[in-house]
Image (cartoon, rainbow, N blue to C red):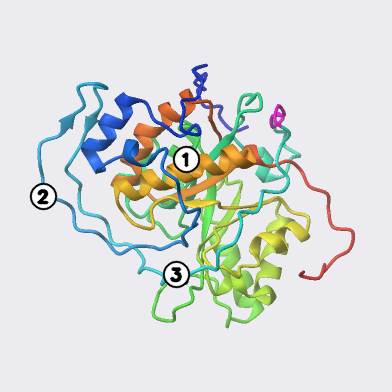
Amino acid sequence: MARKPASKKPKTKKRSGGGGFGLSLALAAAALLIGGGLGLYYGDALTGRQALVTESPAIAAPSPTAPSTSASTGIALPQTAAPLQPAPAPEALQPAAPQPPEPQIASLPPQETIPEPSASDPPWQRNAVPVPNSAGSPRIAIVIDDMGIDRKRSQRALALKVPVTFAYLPYAPGVADQVRKAHAAGHEILVHLPMEPSSDSIDPGPNAMLSALPPEVLAERLAWNLSQFDGFVGVNNHMGSRFTSNAAVMQPVLEELRRRGLLFLDSRTAPNTVGYRMARDLGMPALQRDVFLDNTDSHDEVAKRLAETEQHASKYGQAIAIGHPRDATLDMLELWIEDVQARGFVLVPLTALLKPVAPPATAGLPIR
């Protein structure tokens, strides 16, 4: 049975004005010190653009300075960043055609909660982190990708004071031990499955799923990636803009994930991805991301995207935001978490946005 994280009862403070996206003055003052601010962007009209994922190149750390502290909040705001560890090369962006956000399918009713897991449950339920009743409040799931390579920042992410879903790269050094620590801290786990990007010059990592490989090799690689650690609820794609757009290679992968009782989160790294739609048609639990937090690695960008996440959750009842273990992302999440809960949002693990779905009526459903 998955460990239950210590739950923090949301405050009953009503949402502030400006459409529910204004931050408290204390938090805004703290945010201004580190990035020009959350307070500057919350309440502004946003474009609704949902950027595609990018694995940005390592960004040079700023010159070391003494930590600053907000007098109004007492939050230490570190200005020194340790050098980033080597990471896979960035995947080139492909501009997506504007499209209205699609509400997630298979969401829980507002006051329903995931039942206590049993040994007979599929892994997406058995390894889920239980959550308290959200009482109809809008829910937000934060997913942190690329966990495990940058061990210092991955460890820092575990200290976030709400259930977070962490997607670990299977080839990260010591990944099984890192995952055990994440479980102990009360977080859910995904396998961040490396998949083929659109550019041939970019390496998604060892044992990546490549569309030109024969089926038996793809099956071997999938099995290897799913065997590097235990306790995960499902899979999301690392890169994969080419692979997730190819129905012929995606179908056997999703069928194997369904057979294993795993969920699939489509990171939507390409505008023509078939992952979420195919998984849903196959009758397996499936979700797709709504917002990327940090395509641009800056406090200002993360602040804008957090505001966008709140807007989506307010409109549709729930939202999924994906970020990375970077200093700017973690700085802003640490500031935002308590404030957003005080304004009536509930932060939940990914599986809280799912309920069991019916199996398909026939095998090999056509892709619509």
> Mark 3 or mark 2, which is nearer the start of the sequence?
2
Residue 325 image position (x, y, % from top left): 36, 48
Which residue is found at the position 71% from the left and 50% from the top? 285
Give the Cα distance between marks 2 and 3.
34 Å
Q: Which residue is mark 2?
A: 63
186 left or right of 90 in image: right
Task: Point out the image quarter for the N terminus.
Answer: top right
* Along the line of sight, the residue nearer the viewer: 130 or 302: 302
**Tag 3: amino acid:** Pro
Query: Image point 49% across, 57% down: which residue?
Result: 49
| Horizontal and vertical percent position of residue 201 | 39, 80
What residue is pinned by disc 1? 180
Q: Nearest the camera: 349 or 318?
A: 318
Along the horizontal axis of the image, is 246 left or right of 53? right
Horizontal and vertical percent position of residue 18: 46, 32
Q: Looking at numbered disc 1 in the image, what kind of residue is underneath it?
A: Arg
Is residue 349 visible in the rendered image? The answer is no
C-alpha gap between disc 2 and disc 1: 34 Å
Q: CA distance from mark 3 to mark 1?
A: 22 Å
Compared across the picture, whether 262 is left or right of 26 comes to: right
Mark 3, secondary structure of its residue: loop
> Looking at the rendering, in which quadrant would you find the C terminus?
bottom right
Instruction: Please report the bounds of the magenta region as a residue range.
Output: 110-115
Q: Amino acid at mark 2?
A: Ser
Report the disc number at residue 206: 3
- Residue nearest the observer in this picture, 187 or 15: 15
Q: Is residue 236 above or below residue 347?
A: below
